[in-house]
Amino acid sequence: VQKLGIDSIGFYTARHYMDLSTLAVARDLDPNKYHIGLGQYTMSIPAPNEDVISMGAAAGARALKNIDKKTISTVIFATESGIDQSKAGAIYIHRLLNLPPHCRAIEFKQACYGSTAGLIMALPMLLANPDQKILLIASDTARYGLNTPGESSQGCGAIAMVLSVNPRLVSIDLRTGYYTQDIMDFWRPNYRDEAFVEGKYSSRMYLQGLNETWSHYQAATELGFQDHDRFCYHTPVPKLTEKAHKYLAKHCKVTLNPEKSNAHIFDSLIYGRLIGNTYTASLFVCLVSLLDNCPDDLSGERIGFYSYGSGCVAEFFNGTVSPQYRDHLDTDFNKSMLQTRLPLTYSQYQEFYNFTLPVDGSTVEIPALAKCDYHFTRLSEHKRCYEGEHEPVE
Ligand code: HMG
């Protein structure tokens, strides 16, 4: 049987962050509410010249480093922070990355689940054309109102994955468990920039989705909790992932000591604690965090993945880490990219947050407040312009 999965991964986040200790002072709260209560330390905040396109392109450039671009047949862009109702963000990224013209470009949406939908739907396409590869990009900005309970669970970032046969990083098992239910736990009407959310209800529904997808997954695979060596969960806040993992173990009647629980999830949460929620990218940020930070050799280990998108659709699936995966990681870049982010003062945070664009078609040059390879440069006649580094296609 042909293996299908993730051949390379690129990761990117905004160049500035908000320290939750700084936010705690502004909100007159104990910082432990964020550090201990949510497991969150800092969150990436996009500058006016950064958005889902610029971050997605930057992640894409990393994922394509050692890939022949002519083999990319399709770019799938998953986001819930899209810049246009009609045109796919994938088309902008296709140009910025200088991908060949005979390549499809499409956008997927279902809250944080859109990227998993992209993965599960794209992989079987590779069976028909095993010489081709698919570029899947997940990029989002989590934005809630200032001074609302969701504020401390913001963040932004992007993941790009090249999908192929005989993947060098992780092969994905197409036997999965999935679940849909029409609920209003988190949503963002077309006329709003910030999401509405029922925080406690959404957290309950996240756990219910885990319960439902796990049963369906078990029926499909006959795999038990103990057949998985590590777990990656969609992580709106790290504390919810810790709770979900305990919840799943209990559901499966497995006794988990803290050491075992840490071995399962600790390394997957390291990057998320620093960048915050990244919606569609979040589950795969956990994967990169695990691969980059786990001191053990993960070759041959099975990872369980739980994807949840509000509204809601959820899916549980698994993947097996390839031998020699370490030779194909981008760990040094990822770590230095995180280390070189700049802290925002509270007033700079407000300035970034409140930056708005004209809606009357007038031209604005976007202040280049973040130093990045790809950026949103101007808005003119309702058209967004991007610039970025790219090499010509051969
Ligand atoms: P909150 O108001 O910060 O929660 O909201 P809280 O007041 O219950 O506090 C959280 C924890 O901090 C509690 O512990 C407190 O006891 C503790 P717990 O009861 O949970 O064990 N605490 C402290 N601990 C130590 N020292 C202190 C202290 N003070 C309090 N001094 C919530 C948290 C996540 C609900 C909020 O951030 C929110 O509404 N976020 C947005 C929605 C969200 O993330 N939902 C998660 C599930 S839905 C989802 O994952 C989908 C999503 O990604 C969107 C999509 O699919 O597109 C959101």
Image (cartoon, rainbow, N blue to C red):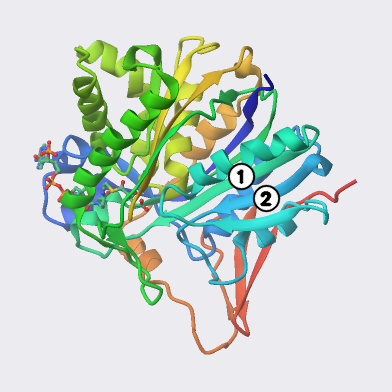
Residue plotted at (59% across, 53% down): 77
Q: Quadrant of residue 45?
A: bottom left
The kind of secondary structure element at disc 1 is: strand
In percent of width and height, residue 148 lies at 19, 61
Q: Which mark is residue 115?
A: none
Left or right of residue 160: residue 129: right
Q: Nearer the viewer, residue 186 or 380?
A: 186
Mark pair 2, 1: CA separation = 6 Å
* Residue located at (62% from left, 48% from top): 58
Q: Hey, which quadrant is residue 314 in on the image? A: top left
Q: Which residue is mark 2?
A: 75
- Please, is residue 159 above or below residue 25 in the view? above
Q: Nearer the viewer, residue 114 or 242?
A: 114
- Percent coordinates x, y for residue 195 in the rendering: 32, 63
Position above or below: 174 against 355 = above
The crowd level at tag 2 (other Cα within 10 Å; few <14, some 14-19, many 20+) is many
* Circle 1 Cα neighbour tier, 10 Å, few/some/many (<14 / 14–19 / ≥20): many
Q: Evaluate if marks 2 and 1 touch, with contact meaning CB atoms under 8 Å apart.
A: yes
Q: Is residue 180 above or below residue 349?
A: above
At 41% across and 54% down in the image, what residue appears?
A: 111
- Identify the amino acid type marked 1: Leu
In the image, residue 189 lies at what x, y percent?
A: 36, 71
Q: Nearer the viewer, residue 132 or 330?
A: 132
Q: Which residue is mark 1?
A: 136
- Quadrant of ligand 1: it is top left
